[in-house]
Amino acid sequence: MDSRRSSRAVIDPKVRQVGFFTSAPLPPDRTQSDPPDPIRSPPLADASSPGNSLSPVMIPPPRHPSDSLLRLPHSPSDAFPPPSPTTTTTSLGDFSDDVTAASSPPPAAARVRGRGSSVKQQGAASSFPGGGFEVPPSVKAPSSVPASGLTTVSVVKLPPGISVEVQSDRALNSKPLKEKTSKAERRAIQEAQRAAKAAAKAEGIKTPAVTALANAKSAKSTKPSPQRNDSAVVVAASEKKGGDRSVEKDRKKDVPHPRMQYDDKSRVQKLKKRSVVKPTEARNRVELFRHLPQYEHGTQLPVLQSKFFQLDTLHPAVYKVGLQYLSGDICGGNARCIAMLQAFQEAIRDYSTPPAKTLSRDLTAKISSYVSFLIDCRPLSVSMGNAIRFLKSQIAKIPISLSESEAKATLHSDIERFINEKIILADRVIVKHAVTKIRDGDVLLTYGSSSAVEMILQHAHELGKQFRVVIVDSRPKHEGKLLLRRLVRKGLSCTYTHINAISYIMHEVTRVFLGASSVLSNGTVYSRVGTACVAMVAYGFHIPVLVCCEAYKFHERVQLDSICSNELGDPDSISKVPGREDINHLDGWDKSENLQLLNLIYDATPSDYVSLIITDYGMIPPTSVPVIVREYGRGQLWI
Amino acid sequence: MPDTQVLVNDFLNKLKKRKIEGSQATARQTAELLRSVISQQRVPYTNQAGALIDAVKAVGEQLIAANPVELAVGNIVRRVLHIIREEDLSLTTAAIGGLNLSAVSDDENDDDRDGDSTLSAAAVAAAARSTLRPPSLQTLLEDTPVSAAVPQTSSSGGDSEGKSKSADKSSRSRKLKHDVIEAVNELIQDIVTCHEQIAEQAVEHIHQNEVILTLGSSRTVLEFLFAAKEKKRSFRVFVAEGAPRYQGHLLAKELVARGLQTTLITDSAVFAMISRVNMVIVGAHAVMANGGVIAPVGMNLVALAAQKHAVPFVVLAGSHKLCPLYPHNPEVLLNELRSPSELLDFGEFSDCMDFGSGSGSPLLHVVNPAFDYVPPKLVSLFITDTGGHNPSYMYRLIADYYSADDLVVQRRATAGN
C-alpha cells in the first residue's frame, strides 16, 4: 500500500512546484502526518507560514485527493527545533528495507521517518545555516541514496553541523513533458527522499552529518537498487541539466506558437496539401481579415460525406464530431471540448500500435492528424487547444514499459478525469461561487447562451432566490432563444431582447453574467461576438460584469483587439434573415464585387469592463488572470 | 372647411398606424397639410395671425398626439407657428413704421391695437433682427430708445412699407396668408433639399481611404456618402445591419449599387470593428435642444464604442429634425416598443407570453424598443443644412427656428380652448 501511495506522490510535488517554486534550499518537513509526533503542534505549523518562501501571491495549490498529504515547505526557522527524543525514535523501522537501503551510516543517523507522505521532501531541500553547498561532492558517503529522474542525491558524510541538500529542483525546472517516470524510478525517488530525510534527521540530532548533493553518477555507482532498471538511470542523467537554464528555456517554450496566418501563401499551400477537406475559398474576403481562414461555408459537408468510406485514417467518432462542428450541431466551448475528448477516447480505445512503432509517438501523430481534421471543420477554441495539449502530454508521459492495454486504460482515465475535474466539477464550483452573488430582487442580464451561466441561473432558481433574467440575443445565431426556452420551461421569469436594445434594458439590470470562450492573460475576455458591447454598456451604467469561465480555458496568449485573432462564420447567414421575408434587399447582391459580408464569431472584451471573473479557483479580478495562468497553467494541464 | 378635416383625419390615421415613418416624409407631409389648413382657414377681419395660429395649433395638437414619438411633426407645427408670427411681425412692423412715419395713429382698429400692443416693443426689436441688421454700436452705446431705431428699419424697407401704408385692410389680410403660405412652401422646399445641402459638405469631412461606419439606413447618410464618392474620394463603409429592422441591408445594397466598397456586419460586431474605423456617420431621428440625439435603436452602443476608441461620431440631421424640447428620461418617454414578432416568431413562445394563463403575470417579456438616446457628450459633430455644429450649440440653433411661445404646443392650445 505504501508503494502505491508514494508512486502517486511522485507526481504530487509537481503540483506544488507550480508557483511556489523557490530556489532557496528548504529544510525537510518534519511536522508530518505522523500522529504521535509531538512537534506537529498548531503553533509551530503557524510559525512556518510567514517564514516559508512562498511566493507573495498566496494562492493555495489546487487540491486533489492526494493533496492531504502535501504540506507547504517549512521555513528553516521552524524546521530544526530542538529535536525531541520521541521524534527521532517513533517511526524508526517503519520501512525496514528502505532504512537499510538508505542508511549505512551509523544507526543513530538512520532514523528514518519513512512514510508514504515523505513526498513533500521532494520539492524541498534543507540546509543548515552553515550551508552545505560548498561541501565538495567528492566526499562520498559509504552508502548513498538512489538517484532518479527527479531527484539525484548523493549522501556525503561530513563533520557535524553541515547541511543536507536534496537536490530536487530538477523536477521543478525540467519540462514535465519530458519526464517519464516508471515504477522503478518512482521507487528510486522514494528511496532518495527517505534517505534524505534520514540524513536530515541525523543532522538534527548532531550525529555525523549527511549531505545529499546532486550527483547522479555517484548515486548510480554506489547503490543500484534491485528494481531499478537502466532506463531510469538514463533518464536521470538526461534530465540532469543546469536548473536555471532549463527554467529559461521553459519560459521561452511557454510562449505560444504564433498562430497560422492565412495570408501567408506558402504556408497555406502546405496546409492544403495535408488537409482532408478541400474547402473553396470565399470570394469576397474582408480585407482586414485576410489572415484568417475564410472559406465558403458548407461546401465541405458534401465532400466529406462522399469521402466517408475513403477516410480510413480517421476514426469514425472523430469524423462524426468533425461533421457536428461543421454543421453547428455542437457549439459552445465546453460542449465542443467534451465532444472532442470523448471522440478521442473512443479513438484511443480502438487504437492499436502498428508494428515497429512506439505507442506514444504513433498515437501523438494520430491525434495530431485528428486535430488537423477538426481544425479543417472548424478552428479550435482555446479550451480545445488546452485539452489537446493536456492529452498529448499525457501520451508523452506514458512509460515505455507499460503495455498497450494499460497505456490505453491510463489515457482513458486521464481524459475522463480531465472532463470531470476541469469541466464538470469546475462548473459546479463556479456555480457555487456565483450563486453567492445573486440576491433576491436582482435583475440578471446574460448574453447569448453560456452553459455556465445557465447552470448558475438554474441553481439560483432552485435555491429559491427571487430574480429576473434578461436574455440579450443577437444575430445570426440566436443562441439566446434556446436558453430562453430552457429557462422559461424551468419557470424563471425572463425578458428577451436583442443586442441593439441593450442601452434601453440596462437601466433595470443589477448584474451582468457573461460566459467566455477564453480568458487571455492580459485580462481580455475572448467570447462570442457582442459580449464586448454588453460589457461596455454595463460598464457605462456602473453595473457589475461577472464573467464565468472555467480555468482550463485560460490562456497565456494576449490580445488587444478582435481582429488579430478571430473566427469567421458563414457570410451568407448575414444577408438572410430567417423568418423575415420582407428583408430581402440583398438577394442577388451578395455576388457583387463591392459587397462583403462579415460574420465575426468572437470579440475581445477589454479587461476594464470586467468587474470579476468567476473561475473554479474562486472569484478573481481580471488583473489576476496572468497569475492564475502562471501559477496553475502547468498544474492544471499536468494534473 | 370639411376638406381640411378629411385631410387631417387621413393624416392622423396614417400617423397612428405608423404608415408614415421617417422624419423627412412626416415633416414634409405635415408641412403640406398645414399649408392646406392655412389656405383653407377663413381669416377674420381682425387678428388674422391669431386666427391662423389657433387653427394650426388645433391641428398640430392632434398630430402630435397621434404619434408623440415622431418629433418631426411637432417640429414642423412649431416651425409653421413661428413662420406665422414672423410674417405677422414683419407686417406689423411695416405698419407701425408706416404709422410712425405718417403719424397716423387712430386709423387702426382698437382690437387690433390691443392684440398687438404687447407685441409691439418686442416686435420691433425682432423685426430689426429679422432684417439681419444688428443694432449699430452707436445706438447701443448711446442707449437710444428702440423707437428711434424703428424708423431706420422701416425706411430701409421703403417699398413694402409704402405698399402696406397704402393698402387697405382686406389686402393686408390676404397678404399675411399669402406670405405665410409662401414661407411654408419655402420650408417644404428646405425639407426636400436638406439632403443635398448636407451632402455638399461631405468632401470637407471624408478624405481618401477613410473607413466609415454607419448603422441602419438613413437617406441623409446615403446622399452624404454618394456626394463624397462623386468627388472621387474612395473609401470603405462598414454598415451595421440595425436589427430588428435590418435597414442596413438596404443601405448596403444602395451603396454597392453606386460602387462603394461596402462591408455588412452584424450589430454585435460593432465593438470589434470600431477600432479600425476612422469615423462614424449616422443619421438621426431627432435632435434635442440639449444636443442629445434620438436615433434608431442601437445607436447608443455605436456611440459608446466610438467614444471608447476616440472615433468621431458625426450625426447628420436636417433642420426639420431639430426639436426645441429638452429631453427628460428620453430612453423611456421618447421611445416606443415595437412588436415582439420582430424578435420571436408568433407561436414560438406565445404560451409563455400569455397574460391569461397561470398566475397572471407572464414568464416571458419581449422588449423591442424602436429608438435609442445618445447623450450629447457622445456626439462629436452635428452636420445640418446650415453647417457643422457642436452639440452644445444646438439650443442656439433652435432659437433661430422656433419662437419661445410655441415650445409647448399642447398646453397653450388647451388653455386657449
Image (tube, coloured by chain):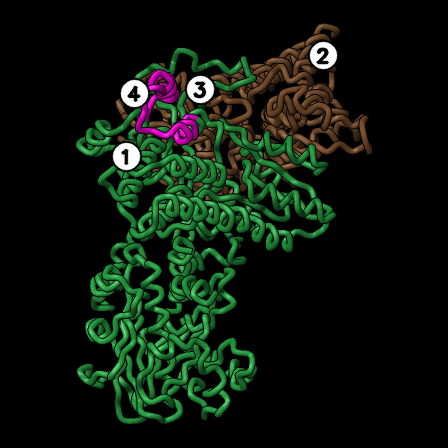
Label 1 vs 4, first from the N-terminus = 4
Q: Amino acid at mark 2?
A: Asn
Identify the colour of chain A in the image. green
Identify the colour of chain B in the image. brown
Of marks 1 and 3, the one in the foreground: 1
Residue range in magenta is A295-323
The answer to whether marks 1 and 2 sit on the same chain is no
Disc 1: which residue? A291
Q: Amino acid at mark 4?
A: Thr
Q: In screen coordinates, is A384 left or right of B336? A: left
- Mark 4 crowdedness (10 Å alpha carbons): few <14, some 14-19, many ≥20: few
Residue B9 disc label: 2
- Mark 3 crowdedness (10 Å alpha carbons): few <14, some 14-19, many ≥20: many
Label 3 vs 4, first from the N-terminus = 4
The answer to whether marks 1 and 3 sit on the same chain is yes
Disc 3: which residue? A575
Q: Mark 1 touching mark 4, by CB under 8 A?
A: no
Q: Is residue A517 visible?
A: yes
Query: Which of the chains bears the disc numbered 2?
Result: B
Count of residue discs? 4
Percent of width and height locating residue B386: 44, 30
- Mark 1 crowdedness (10 Å alpha carbons): few <14, some 14-19, many ≥20: some
Q: Does the stretch in magenta take in B317?
A: no
Label 1 vs 3, first from the N-terminus = 1
Front position in the image: B28 or A8: A8
The answer to whether marks 4 and 2 sit on the same chain is no
Q: Does the stretch in magenta take in A302?
A: yes
Disc 4: which residue? A280
Q: Amino acid at mark 3?
A: Ser
